[in-house]
Image (tube, rainbow, N blue to C red):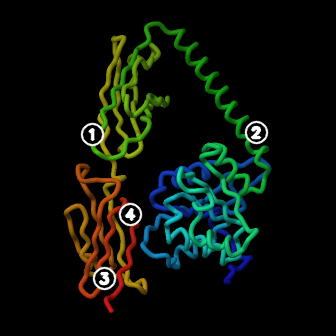
Amino acid sequence: MSRIDPEAPYTNYAFISYSHRDMATAKWLQRRLEGYRLPTEIHNELDDSRYLRPIFRDQTDLNTGVLTSVLRRQLERSKFLILICSANSAASAWVSAEARAFVEMGRLDRIIPVILPSKDIPEPELFPEFLRNYFKENPGTELLGVNIGEVGKEKALVRVVSRMLDVEFDKLWNRHERMRRRRLALTACGAALIAGATYLFAWPVALTVAIEPHSSGLPEPATLTLNVNGADYEAPFSSPVFNDLRLPGYFRFKTVAIKASANYFTPADTTISAGWGTHARVALPLRRDDSFARYEGTVYTSDMQALEGVNVELAGESQFTDSLGHFAFTLPVERQRVELPIILSKEGYVSVSRDDEVPGSDLRFIMHEIR
């Protein structure tokens, strides 16, 4: 069992390992961890900051359980391994390989499982295959998971942080709640000040903003965010109209900046001037971004050499990999999907096909020679 040099410096606070089907949870966890402000008495020894940064999120999607040297290096330089354990990752050879590599480095105690519960699968079976087998072979050894289904996202986040900092959960949670109440109080005070200032000026302007999202068969976000001159508002994506947004009277002849944003869409902005009217209405179109448009990656031989001339077929299009084994598709909205079949073929090599490839900018495939 190989171990890393204990004196080698860490460059990542943590490495998040997950199935590509759990990408939304992985992205959420990375964003919230990197945005978590450490208590005053605790400092991040990696970059001397008040935040848990950087958090490395593995964006690789290979059909093999053999780790690349780049990922192994990232694992070696990560202080913790956060495993998102789900029905998807339990079947992922890639997640299993990452867990195995971390254990072989002698750092089982630095693994933090984050459980996405399943109705049909008991929690122990949600761990990657290597850990399931490891626990069977080593009775009495176990890892305590953080179950999002049982404690909710916020408590799960704080539990992960408490493990990483080796600080009691209750202390961190009480601090988290104090900060939340403080934010609510500040928000309430801010609202009172805004209401008081509005009261001082007659004839406020009532603003209605109708967001017009591009219609497609792709996933829709839960909420829309609207920013009007620096103030944020949210509405359900299914009801994309912001009614009765009140602008103080002194804004009447000022330019008002409006910006709308939502996951999977390109932010849209405009400016208006209400003039003498008491009501203004704005329609703001929102177009899809490239979240589901880009399929780009590299094809390798079994010894990890770039493979040129591979015919890659996707969504009715095809192209050959270049001398670096690289291919890239950018699909129009009407042809974008959350998952698409992809086929790779080259004379002398075993064809590779996936029925459920997801968009990404760093897709990787390995093709084996026909023996």
Residue type, label 3: Val
The dot on residue 361 is: 4
Residue type, label 1: Ser
Determine the residue positioned at 36% across, 84% down.
368
Measured Cα–Cα span from mark 2 to mark 4? 40 Å
Measured Cα–Cα span from mark 1 to mark 3? 39 Å
Q: Closer to the N terminus: mark 3 or mark 4?
A: 3
Q: Closer to the N terminus: mark 2 or mark 3?
A: 2
- Residue 193 picture quarter: top right
Residue 79 in the image, given as x and y percentages of width and height: 68, 66
In the current view of this chain or complex, which residue is farthest to the bottom? 371
The dot on residue 77 is: none
Viewer-proximal residue among 142 and 215: 142
Residue 19 in the image, given as x and y percentages of width and height: 49, 62
The dot on residue 215 is: 1
SS class, disc 1: loop
State yes or no: discs 2 and 3 in contact (Cβ < 8 Å). Answer: no
